[in-house]
Image: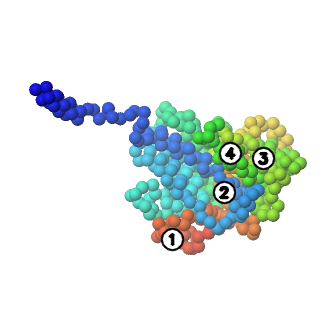
Amino acid sequence: MKKTFILFASILFIGACNNFDEEINKNPNAPTEASGPQLLASAMLSLPDLSSSPQAQFMAQYLAETQYVTASLYPQSSTSFYDLYQDPLTDIQTVLNTSKEENELVVAKILKAYYFWHITDRWGDVPYTDALNGRGDLTPAYETQENIYNKLFELLAEANATPVTGSLANDIIYGGDMEQWKKLGNTIRLLMALRLSKVNPEKGKAEFNAALTAGVMDSNDDNLVFKHLEDANNQNYWYNQIDVLGREWWALTEGLVNEMKPVNDPRLPVYGNPNRTDDEYVGQLYGDTEDFDTEKYSLLGDEIWAQDAPVYLVTYAQVLFAKAEASKMGWIPGEDAEAQINYEMAIEQSLLQWTGSDEGLEDFLAQPDVAYNPATAIEQIATQRWIHLFMNGYEAWAEWRRTGYPNNLVSPAGAQVPRRQIYVESEQFNNTSNYNDAVQRQFNGQESLYGRVWWDKP
């Protein structure tokens, strides 16, 4: 009887186990699905990748190789955009597909626009509408850069028009401040509009003024800055290269030093260190394969490669340089008077951003090569913008392609500065038809570093 009772009780207990609440087996501290804020934070962690690489700085000729100099000779090789699609953009698109929180959707749209702007400016036509569908579409069509720009303008306008309240959790950029996110979105729209200055100035002017009306950055506090930590898990790329791996491979270029040193530019001691030979600022000729020496030339500045050094991506000074150029072109009122005001304010904000002080600003602005000159204003604005964009190489390279300034970039081993980057080879095999269509449409079937993207007009 005792055995029968135990058996009966066991059957009842097993049956009762099937009635447990399913939630009992879920660990609330180990979620199996990422939330919207977590996905957006993950996408934000990829932001330094848009700037922190030697290749980016080579394109703008900010840095020269001191050791493996052939790396800066513009080899005819491809560059992959896969990581940007597979990591940040996949996270962002997941938020756009699943979230119902307006704050999350606004930030997702702004980040999507920023990443795609970066991608299309480097490669030209790329997958956009048909991209990010996972296994639903493994061979997305390439969309024209013009269409992508138009859709990104619309996306940024939508983000600005969306009402928001409160803040955003897990925001490692602006601490949840939605007003600053909207200023960023409008600023991206403003800078994108300037890219159209040669290919479609009417459209560019309209988008530029729409962005201004919506509200752009109005101080350095609004800058898009990625702030590294004194922590191996979130440290500066350049710290790992120079301090951890001991690679003193990068010196300031001769072109950069020659622009800054003669006018006693206060930013130069931040950008680079004096050389070890005679404690002077000496730039290395970009791409020089014969005369390179870590002792003779000014290596990358300590403040730039510090473990917790920030990465500046979109800044208030860029807004002011853009407004200066827009005034000169007649896109906004004020002509030279307004252009000069914005030009000088841009330099002031650049000094504050990089040095923390505007000491010496008046003397610097009075230098003949720096003082605003209506006859050479576009060149001056573009050159000072290039100096300001130090270490944001892809953006500086895009502006050089648009304006042609500064006009001191050299051709190492006879190779001109590239006009774009080459699609990754695997696209030829895995997405053959769409790849071929894109190359034929843009470059008459000739894939190279020297095909011009849509807005890059002679």
Residue position marked by numbered label 4 in the rendering: 244
- Pointer 3 residue: 272
Mark earlier in primary sequence (3, 1): 3
Query: Does residue 106 appear in this view?
Result: no
Element type at marker 3? loop
In three-dimensional space, the C-alpha distance between marks 2 and 4, rounded to whole angstroms, equals 20 Å
Which residue lies most toward the top here?
Answer: 2
Check disc 4 and report its element: helix, strand or loop: helix
Amino acid type at mark 1: Asn
Q: Identify the residue at image location x=26%, y=32%.
A: 20
Category of crowding for the residue at label 2, using alpha-carbon neighbours closer than 10 angstroms: few (below 14), some (14–19), many (at least 20): some
Closer to us: mark 3 or mark 1? 3
Above or below, 353 relative to 208: above
Task: Give 408 or 198, whichever is nearer the viewer.
Answer: 408
Asked if marks 4 and 3 touch (Cβ < 8 Å), the reply is no
Q: How is the image coloured?
A: rainbow
Circle 2: residue type: Gln
Instruction: Say whether marks 2 and 4 touch (CB < 8 Å).
Output: no
